[in-house]
Amino acid sequence: MPYEIDETHDPKLESWVESANDPATDFPIQNLPLCDFTGTIGDQQDRKLAVRIGEKLFLLDKALEAGLFPSLPSDLDGTFWAGFTGNRDVYSIYELESGVRKELRRRLSELLGTTCDDLRGNPELIDRVLIDAAAADFYWPPSAFDYTDFYASVYHATNVGSMFRPDNPLLPNYKWIPVGYHGRASSVVPSGTPVRRPTGQLSPAEEGGAPGFGPCKMLDYELELGVVVGRGNELGQPIPIGEAEDHILGMCLLNDWSARDMQKWEYVPLGPFLAKNFATTVSPYIVTMEALAPFRSPAMVRPDGDPKPLPHLFDERDQAHGGIDITLEVFLASKQMRDKKMDPIRLSKGTFKDMYWTIAQMLTHHSSNGCNMQPGDLLGSGTISGPTREARGCLLELTWDGDPFANPPKLVPGTERTPIKLPTGEERKFIADGDEVIIRGYCEREGFRRIGFGECRGIIEPAIG
Ligand code: MN
């Protein structure tokens, strides 16, 4: 299980890579996230798997080739491994068992720390395995094969349900199954990729009327975390809840861009479709489950009267450690704000620790019918919202005046909205062309080094036509 704290989490550890010791960095030696990038290495363009440390990228294939990991399996390398379907690439490292992953992390920490000379004492080798992060000109999304999006925040589900069904916000299945839908991997893009405003059928202005067809008028973001699958399971062989976390490689930031006027029209009876699959943006770094160990917390305590999860979704260790305290913030900068060199404004701040379902429960549920998960599969958590207005994870909730958690609940049908005011005097109920949405995430806990996820950003371009 990746919950245990070991010497790699010691807050006193420092690296000889000086930029990793900057108190403001997201990437100190206690983090060591994986990333897949294309960049100029030596005098040629190449695609590589690397570990981010401070302002540098540590090239795993070069380091393995140089024999810096003598205790790892000898067939392991940092090059592509052709997957089951052969249509995308993932790396052999994704498939490691958790014990071997721990060993990889321990050795990385040693090589980049200040007490070992195997790398630090060899300038020629340093030149081969360490490059400037700025030399990476494109990051690949961590998703390889498939993408599924869940709905694991009960606060989000209740807010959104209240808009569409004021009398019946949570459907009866919500507290029994981690609700999800199959998204689309082909449109998962890395941070920084421009996103085109989608065109589609828009919900009729009045009930019973004809839908419009044109550019989405209610474009939204959804603040989410992505879970990247490590080892997969055979078709027909469910992953037991007690083993689920051994199949998870790590996590990234995720923005599930959403066209609300398309979603409202299409979502019954089969769930979201074109309202969601035009783009999903992810941050390029996979923060490993081992790096997240110090920030674990108990799973959310269910309110009195809620059902206990069915046995196949219940595990004592998951209940004790299934929460993860990741602080998440969303910022927006309009084109005018960027032109005037204004800082982005913060729209919301929340935490991942109060999700109704744990990531182990989501993965176990996904495979409970025998569905085979594959290395590099991406699971979205669902919009991360909390009980307060500040912790609402999308504009659909933020500009809505209702509050189902007030006493008594204050429910307003979803049409009336209070806009968010920008420092330029502009107002937003939903996202305008030229707006940039930026998600940041980090973990902090007394007695441990702060680690971060980097950024997940995207600018909206006007619709075609
Ligand atoms: Mn979503």
Image: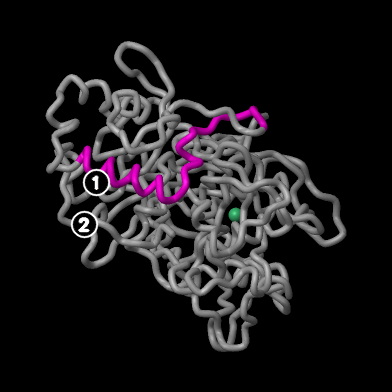
Q: Give the residue at mark 1.
A: 29
Task: Give the residue at x 65% y 61%.
Answer: 365
Task: Give the residue at x 61% y 43%.
Answer: 374
Mark toward the viewer: 1 or 2:
2
Ligand 1 in which quarter: bottom right
Q: Residues within 10 Å of mark 2 (few under 14, many from 20)?
A: some
Task: Give the residue at x 32% y 45%.
Answer: 105
Question: Distance of mark 1 from mark 2, alpha carbons?
Answer: 10 Å
Q: Are marks 1 and 2 in contact (CB under 8 Å)?
A: no
Q: Is residue 270 left or right of residue 238?
A: right
Q: Report helix, strand or loop for mark 1.
A: loop
**Is residue 104 in the magenta section?**
yes
Where is the N terminus found, in terms of image quarters? bottom left
Could you tell me the amino acid type at mark 1? Ile
Q: Is residue 322 left or right of residue 150?
A: left
x, y percent for residue 310: 66, 74
Q: Give the residue at mark 2.
A: 10
- The span picked out in magenta is 85-112
In this orientation, which residue lies closer to the viewer: 339 or 455?
455
